[in-house]
Image (cartoon, rainbow, N blue to C red):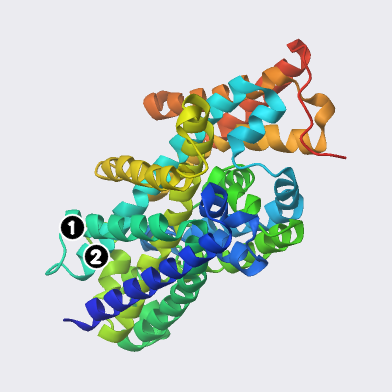
Amino acid sequence: MSMQLFILVAYILVLYGISWYATKLIQQGKGGALQYLLAGRNLPMIVVAAMLAGLAIGGASTVGVAEHAYKAGLSAGWYNAAWGMAGILAGIFAAHYFRRMEVNTIPEMMERMYGKSARMISVVAQLLIMMVITSLQYVAGGAVLTALMPDVFTFQTGMMVTAVLFVGITFIGGYWGAGLTNVVNIIVIYGGILAALWNSSEVFGGFESIVAALPEGGPWFDFVSGAGFAMVMSWMVVMITQGFSVQAISQIAFAAKNEKAARWGFILGGVIILPAGFLCALFGIIAAAKFPGLERAALALPTIMTNISPMVGGIFLAALWAAGISTAVGLLLGSSTLVMQDVWKRFFPSTVTEKNELLLSRLMVLLFSGVTYFLALTSVGILRTITTALAITASFTLLILANIFFPKYCKKAAGFWTILASVAVWLAWTLYPQIRVVPHVVYLVWPACLATFALAYFLGKEPAESIIKR
């Protein structure tokens, strides 16, 4: 067995061990769906921070950023920095409110504020977003395993092994398992990244040698020009928008021990996220210097890994897998919570009992895992696909923040129609390239949502319910 494979297997065993331990915490909390899907609303601040950071630092933040940095340089790191800013701002302005609401899902929150129609369209929109992101974690995991160990894995078998690990951890340990494994994952991610950067510098002759080998005239160490100001701002707008309203993110606050743990956990998580993108962008720059002309830019980071020490490469391989795992488990649980709470219990309430609710919750994990794995077989374009789908969250963020801070301007009609407007604009952008007159779809989604919200205010009759007890 190679050193890399040995480290990978050892890491898998550690994560499964943590997941089995998490089952004891679920049982101590008297079991049930609340313990499995929301950790009994008892996550401490450190675990809240690890869950947020783990959700953010996924395949797009490592392999995807390095891919983009292969041509755009250090500015590709703003993708993750924008994520970090989103966590900090959500912590300051919203996370403690989310914990106070005592809800399970964003659609449930929408129903309380804007009625049943808002809840149902919310389920569709939230699942669409999370299916896209989850499927890409399988793609990233399969790509990494194939590039680093082609004698062991094909792309298909790499994806399959990745899926088994993601689903196994989630199925066994639930939200406690996801939280505790993410504490380990974040340590492994940063340890692996730093070790690989240090070893890469040694292997390729030091930093000065790398800089000297870069193609002339490139935007390698400029913080903006490579990606471009418009793209950097797009990432900022999209990430800050989704930070307030994606189920998988908000669920972390729902599961926090108290309002303080929610607020400071999000702020700490945002700080942890901030540097990861710029560090991973350095791998793209190193690859541009030492391996120009790669067939695909997505091979930038895996190519470096095959040229460094097997020990460090194995640790870094575990780190890259940790990035995908940490994102996928949060997404799988968020999506399963949506299906369980907003679909199954609503349409098949007679099938849910106190005794079988935990089993049904686990079955939802398997169901959603199967659907997203199938989608993963056709997903491409890591960063672009994710950020365009996330633009839909503009409607949720507008509806939630308006209800918290400006409730007198909220009408019930705004819920359904504002969310529908965001989905319609995203679909139009996806299907009809001729409407792409701005750098990113989010610049069309926000005006559409604001206009729809304003029309609902003037034309709607029934006021929305304020979800915050003042």
Judged from the image, the secondary structure of the residue bearing numbered disc 1 is helix
Name the residue that disc number 2 marks: 145
Within-10-Å neighbours for mark 1: few <14, some 14–19, many 20+: some
Is the residue 180 above or below the residue 3 in the image? above
Quick one: 434 or 353, which is closer to the camera?
353
Q: Amino acid at mark 2?
A: Leu
The answer, for residue 440, to whether it is visible in the render is no
Is the residue 389 above or below the residue 166 in the image? above
Quick one: 32 or 121, which is closer to the camera?
32
Within-10-Å neighbours for mark 2: few <14, some 14–19, many 20+: many
Name the residue that disc number 1 marks: 157
Judged from the image, the secondary structure of the residue bearing numbered disc 2 is helix
| Apparent side of residue 255 relative to residue 370 in the rendered image (left or right) | right
The answer, for residue 10, to whether it is visible in the render is yes
Give the CA separation, mark 2 to mark 1. 9 Å
Query: Residue placed at 51% from the left, 32% from the top?
Result: 345
Q: Which quadrant of the figure has residue 410?
A: top right
